[in-house]
Amino acid sequence: MLHLAAQIQQSVHVIRAKWHKSPRVGIILGTGLGDLAREIKDPVALPYEAIPHFPTSTATSHAGQLVCGSLGSVDVVAMEGRFHAYEGYSHEQITFPTRVMKALGADTLIVSNACGGMNPHYRHGDIMVIDDHINMMGDNPLIGVNDNTLGPRFPDMSAPYDARLIDCALEIARRENFVAHRGVYVAVTGPNLETRAEYRFLRQIGADVVGMSTVPEVIVAVHSSMRVLGLSAVTDMCLPDALVPATIDHILAAAASAAPKLRAIVLGVLERIANERS
């Protein structure tokens, strides 16, 4: 980890040469939220290949660029596409953009993902606001010698997701009259979907949904003293006794149906953040 500080500053230098503002919020636009990048005002887009030390996104439907600008009245920096362990990247590489967002000035991270619903009360197209998570990825981005300038050796994870942002997200869903649950996300490596026995196990240990991302970025955000809002779009149901094979086309279609709900929550939360310091 000791080499990261210099690499972060190299990335920040390249971004600041194109965009001179300091973001308040970093956003990771996962599956179902990519179109939100088009609503960023006065956008400055940098392909990941143009930013030192950024990996290249190979995931389906992920554009692969960093978009800087404003949403509402809040300056943001948004990842249009993220990185995954199943693409062959280390957790250090996956989370490097989160550290760059923090170094640019962001003190809040909003992260979204597509997930499989294991809670039988959920339906595909629902939104789950992440209350807590379980790391089943077999890795951790903080492994190695700690750099105390980036964060503490043993960051506390008793509340990785900010309670006020969770309440705000749920309030927006009630106001807009759509379903939003509050639950637990479990992260696995992928890329294969789980077996029936694995779904039973993951449900039994307390997870409501399962996905292949988010947790590494959240760990680093907490390490970096950022507050976090996590949003999951349920794109397929993973009920082991009524399991239907999932296809990427089905998942993307469900993510698209959830996109307006995710958009409403993100824009509403940004409005609340803007009012915090007004």
Image (spheres, rainbow, N blue to C red):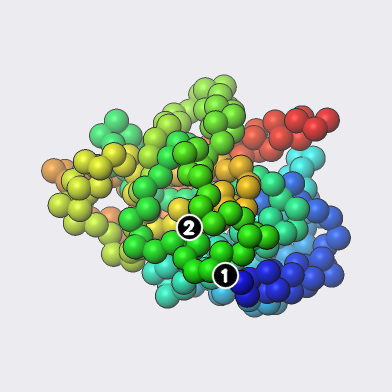
Is 32 rendered above or below residue 46?
above
Label 2 vs label 1, nearer the camera: 1
Q: What's under tag 1, amino acid-wise?
A: Met
Q: Secondary structure at mark 1?
A: loop
Q: Position of residue 97 (x, y in %)?
A: 62, 63
Number of residues whose C-alpha sits closer than 10 Å to that of mark 1, classed few (under 14), some (14–19) or many (20 or more):
some
Give the answer, above or below, for where 196 lies relative to 277: below
Pointer 2 with pointer 1, Cβ within 8 A: no
Which residue does the numbered mark 2 point to in the structure image? Answer: 216
Identity of the residue drawn at 63% across and 75% down: 3
Q: Residues within 10 Å of mark 2 (few under 14, many from 20)?
A: many
Q: Which residue is mark 1?
A: 1
Q: CA distance from mark 2 to mark 1?
A: 15 Å
The label on residue 79 is none
The x and y percentages for residue 190 are 33, 64
Tell me which residue sits at (74%, 74%) in the image. Answer: 10
Identify whether 114 is placed above or below 96: above
Is 49 placed left or right of 167 in the picture? right
Task: Locate the N terminus by quadrant.
Answer: bottom right
Would you say 16 lies left or right of 157 here? right
What residue is at 18 percent from the left and 46 percent from the top?
Answer: 200
Residue at 63%, 47% in the rendered image = 226
Left or right: where does residue 130 sit relative to residue 26? left
Residue type for callout 2: Pro
Disc 2 is placed on an element classified as helix
